[in-house]
Amino acid sequence: MKKPKSLELTEQLKDLVDLHTLLARSGYPIRVEAESRMGSALDWDGSLKASIKITDLGSTDIRRSLPLLQGDRVWVNWLGEAMLTSHLVAFELFIASLSADCYKKVVDLYRHNGYGFDLPPEAPDVAVFRLHISRVRDLINDDLKAAAAEAKEA
């Protein structure tokens, strides 16, 4: 007997909430790298790829949530923010490795407009998030503004 659609959706949403909880903690390794070839840093457009082994998250149910992840970007953005905020230091280290010219060109001239998500067929045990490096800069700036506001109030 086939499950009713509402039950399938309920299970997918539960899996997404569980995945968000796992991504929001920082106890798993993450690999941050430029999305495209960086033979010349000035040819790079600022796209980043963050790879996570699914087994490191403690969950293997990501594929059950794919219909939601492929159907509406809001879910991917929600998960991507959890991953980014829990591993901000790894992204900050990547930004710190950029030359001033590269930073000015790719971080300041482009804008992040949403996360991408993939389970590559060549690496079925890896979840890949894609984002623009300007999102990292925006998050760092938000943290600095909040710290400045707290210091001003104290």
Image (spheres, rainbow, N blue to C red):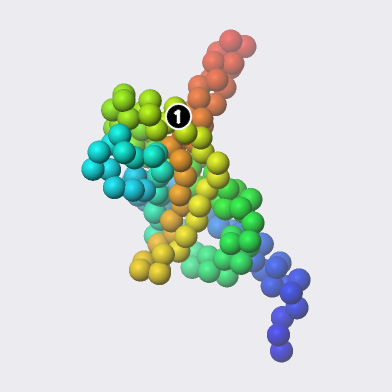
Q: Position of residue 81 (x, y in %)?
A: 54, 44
Q: Position of residue 141 (x, y in %)?
A: 50, 25
Side (left or right) of 118 relative to 38: right
Side (left or right) of 100 relative to 85: left
Q: Residue furthest left?
A: 39
- Residue receiving disc 1: 109
- Residue 89, by quadrant, is top left
Q: Label 1 sits on what residue type?
A: Leu
Q: Residue furthest front?
A: 43
Q: Is residue 106 visible?
A: yes
Q: Please give the name of the residue rendered at 36% of the width and 33% of the height, measured from the top-left corner.
A: 95
Instruction: Tell me: residue 123, above or below residue 150.
Output: below
Q: Position of residue 99 (x, y in %)?
A: 28, 28
- Residue 69, by quadrant, is bottom right
Where does the N terminus fall, quadrant-wise? bottom right
Q: Please give the name of the residue rendered at 51% of the width and 38% of the height, measured from the top-left corner.
A: 112
Q: Please give the name of the residue rendered at 63% of the width and 61% of the height, measured from the top-left corner.
A: 71
Q: Is residue 55 visible?
A: no
Instruction: Tell me: residue 127, above or below residue 142.
Output: below
- Residue 57, by quadrant, is bottom left
Instruction: Tell me: residue 78, above or below residue 69.
Output: above
Where does the C terminus fall, quadrant-wise? top right
Side (left or right) of 147 relative to 3: left
Q: Please give the name of the residue rendered at 51% of the width and 35% of the height, measured from the top-left corner.
A: 111
Instruction: Tell me: residue 4, above or below residue 137.
Output: below
Provide the secondary structure element on which disc 1 rests. Answer: loop
Q: Position of residue 26 (x, y in %)?
A: 45, 46
Q: How many marks?
A: 1
Neighbor class of circle 1 (other Cα within 10 Å; few <14, some 14-19, many 20+) is: few
